[in-house]
Amino acid sequence: MNLLNSKKKGSRHYLLFKYGMLLLLIVSASCSNTDDYTPLVPEEDEELSGGSATSFIFSPDAFGFSVDGLSLDDQITFGVGNSLFNQSWVTAPASTIARDGLGPFFNARSCSGCHFKDGRGRPPAFEGELAHGLLLRLTLPGIGVNGGTIPDPIYGGQFQDNSVFGIDREGILRVTYETVAVTYPDGGSVDLQKPIYEMIDLNYGAMNAAVQVSPRVANQMIGLGLLDAIPEAVLLSYEDENDADDDGISGRPNYVYDVETANLKLGRFGWKANQPTVKQQVAAAFSGDLGITSSLFPEENCNPELNCDEISNGGSPEIPDENLDNVAFYAATLSVPARRDFDNEEVLQGKELFNSINCSGCHIATFETGAYAIDALANQTIRPYTDLLLHDMGDALSDGAPEFRATGNEWRTPPLWGVGLIKTVNDHTNLLHDGRARNIEEAILWHGGEAEAIKNSFMALNKEERTKIIAFIETL
């Protein structure tokens, strides 16, 4: 007997059967129309940005955890380094001799004053607010000692807007903005903000008229040891200074002076790849940002308008090698947070678009680390989305301040890992070397130079496609 005829029309069973058949027909039709569509899937272990050095805590403390696999002694070293990183330094002389010697000029009283929760700094949010991790590098045209930069003869290599009691600060940093309107081909528009930097109320005379000012914002601290563990030959394999492959991208390495070996070495850290090792990056920050001397940078952060010999210091050096090494170890072993929503279909579509317009030409996804002094960081598959090379980013982002091989237009490709958690950790989304971009979209729209064609390809996409790329980047 026909099954349909066995059901009395109007009965509950009949209606259920009828709607069931309709549902089956709808599903069948849907499947027949999508036979050619294959859902996107993530790569194996794609969420493990730092390999086994990946953490899965996405709280406001997401950037502050050590990598797994540290020995008990290394965990103790990490804890000591963490304490030194977060402690506030005081002026000398003080009863707390392990942390005195601040200044006489400085930008922050602690490492975490710029890298709050091991995260990213930002420009002042309003006129009169002190900078939270934004500073100005000062250089003169020409090549200085060991191939480096020439500082301003009075204000040195970095403008400090703080000073110890009894000494006038160098001056006040003021940041204002002008609007730069950008219109998409589809009619949408975005107002970018272009920063204008002023150093006012200078207390030690006029600055050299030829001074070159380079704004730098403190970056998130995660994964530094993993970047250091990428073999040099692997990074250099992406060098294409003369654009031999004709893709418009011509990344090149910076070679900078390594104080400990007294030789030029591949630069990996800093906005212009201007530091060769994690330790030297840390020591340079102690010197420039806090006015704390070390064996690497033993000169006091003073100026010739003062009798610096009469100003108390915290010893020579003010941070002993053991403590400097502890902070460097801490900085090197901060883990990288895992990806979130990495298997979301729209995020995967965004990744495809990211690759198709060649954002991945500079933001290279995957590397293998090699042998390394810290075992937990060795031989890991990592996904930092950088090549650590210099790229011409165009006149709009130029600081006009060369540094070793880097020109004024050139910046190191910043790693993108952790970018989607900056809001969670630091309660802002400011990006680029000076924090001018208030979100990912604005950061992309500021790209120029080698990235001009890629930016234009992004702008030519429809709004839904652009949103998918941004959604993908937010998962990194």
Image: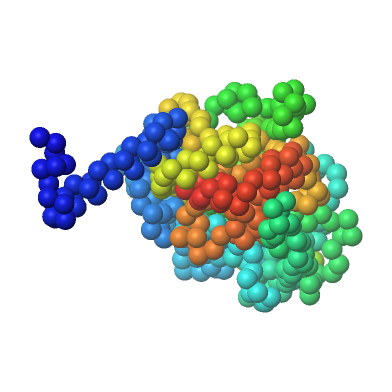
Q: Nearer the viewer, residue 178 or 78?
A: 178
Q: How many marks?
A: 0
Colouring method of the image? rainbow
Percent across and percent down for residue 402 are 79, 44
Asked whether residue 70 is in view, the answer is: no
Percent across and percent down for residue 84 are 46, 56
Percent across and percent down for residue 99 are 50, 61
Percent across and percent down for residue 345 are 43, 43
**Residue shown at 69%/53% (left/top)?**
186
Q: Is residue 3 left or right of residue 62?
A: left
Vertical relation: 327 (above or below) 258: below
**Residue shown at 53%/48% (left/top)?**
468
Vertical relation: 335 (above or below) 191: above
Asked whether residue 239 is in view, the answer is: yes
Q: Nearer the viewer, residue 151 or 383?
A: 383
**Residue shown at 47%/45% (left/top)?**
346
Q: Nearer the viewer, residue 290 or 314?
A: 290
**Residue shown at 42%/35% (left/top)?**
34
- The image quadrant of residue 315 is bottom right
Outermost right residue: 209
Q: Is residue 43 left or right of residue 434?
A: left
Q: Is residue 429 left or right of residue 41?
A: right
Quadrant (top left/top right/bottom left/bottom right) for the N terminus: top left
